[in-house]
Amino acid sequence: MRNRERHSKHRGNNWKNSSRNENGTYANNSSSQQKKHFVPPKAVTAEQIRHDEEAIRAFKSENRPVCAHCGQPITDMASALALENGNPIHFDCALEILDGQEKLGEGEKISYIGQGRFGVVYFPNAHDVKHFVIRKIIEWEDKEHRLPWRDEMSELYSHVK
């Protein structure tokens, strides 16, 4: 019985609460170990957001290029590609041009593979899109040549707060 009382939780000598004071904190805590209050970063004001959005709208309305392939305005410049002469065209128009130029076999399709390149991709099983083979790489845009309309667009978006 004596052994049982020695290990009883009611006596206060449990390892969990043996060194706690009446506040439930440990006696040897210093003020530097206490949690610091979270100070949120300064928020962007609604006026700044409106100003930035207005600048983007003004840029888009002033610089609405026309697709050299179909003649329609390009509304999404981020997905636009360039022809050999540097004029922007719709992504879908580039696919349309490539569909006319490339002779596709059974199970093949043209896909964008990144960095201004397309590929003729072969899918052995039409229902399994995880397994494929790139049979041909088509360099659509030159990696070394920077287009001025891309630089202007990226510069505008990088200044937005």
Image (spheres, rainbow, N blue to C red):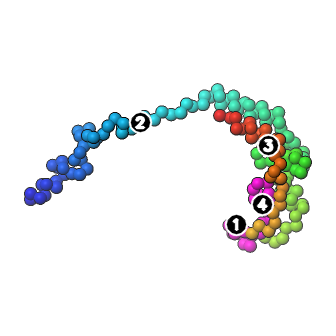
| Residue at the (85%, 40%) spot, across then down | 65
Question: Looking at the image, is 88 positioned above or below residue 123?
Answer: above
Disc 1 marks which residue? 129
Query: Mark 3 to mark 1: distance in Å?
Result: 32 Å
Residue 111, label in figure: 4
Residue 139 percent coordinates (x, y): 83, 58
In this view, the mark in front (4 or 2): 2
Residue 36, label in figure: 2
Residue 67 percent coordinates (x, y): 87, 45
Question: Looking at the image, is 93 positioned above or below residue 149?
Answer: below
In this view, the mark in front (1 or 2): 2
Q: How many marks?
A: 4
Instruction: Give the extent of the magenta segment.
Output: 108-132
Upstream in the sequence, badge 4 or badge 1? Answer: 4
Residue 150, label in figure: 3
Residue 148 vs residue 49: left or right? right
